Amino acid sequence: MQEEIKQEKRWRKSIKLTADVVFKGGRVQFLDREYERFVAGELLKAEGSPGYIIIQSGERTRSLKANAFFHGPLIDAFVRLTGETDRAYWKSYLKELFLFRVTKTGKTYVPSTADLSSGDFARFLTNCKDHLADQGGHLTELEGREYLDAVGSRDKSAKDSENKD
């Protein structure tokens, strides 16, 4: 029984690490050397503990922060602009407007945003934001900062002004 409690405590202390890497010569190369050292330290702390690794190749998919921005502030802005409160309508409308695809065989489809790379999803968000502006809508100042966080492109002036506060 005591051994089971120790094992339970060990599992509760688990940590999940995610890193951008490049696969080279059968090895994993971290893109951020400082983070690589951090991960190595965490691996040493976990010495002898059970665990598992997930290896995923390809581009990173959209972030939870970007997805939350789309379903929250961005759709809110369209609701404010038009008065149409059906959020599912706005989600479908924007996806069809900017993600509509035609295959080589002529079939049409709208991909799930969950299948978009982070870069493709950032472009989608930018297209939606630009469309909002073209229609006379806007994001609040807070929503604008959330947009920059969601697309991962905090400009230098925004960072500088935050650092002054």
Image (cartoon, rainbow, N blue to C red):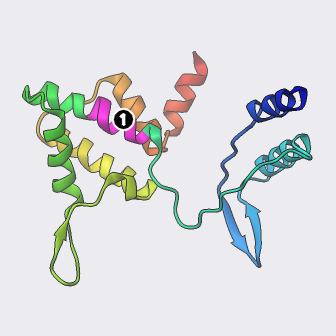
Instruction: Quarter of the image for the C terminus: give it.
Output: top right
Residue at 36% over, 31% down: 144
Q: Amino acid at mark 1?
A: Phe
Residue 12 position, x and y percent, is 74, 30
State which quadrant residue 86 falls in: top left
Residue most extreme to the left: 83
Magenta highlight range: 66-74
Secondary structure mainly formed by the magenta segment = helix
Residue at 15% over, 80% down: 106
Find out whether residue 17 is within the magenta segment: no
State which quadrant residue 129 falls in: top left
Give the secondary structure at mark 1. Answer: helix
Find out whether residue 71 is within the magenta segment: yes
Q: Which residue is mark 1?
A: 69
Residue at 20% over, 66% down: 109
User: Is residue 75 shown left or right of residue 143?
Assistant: left
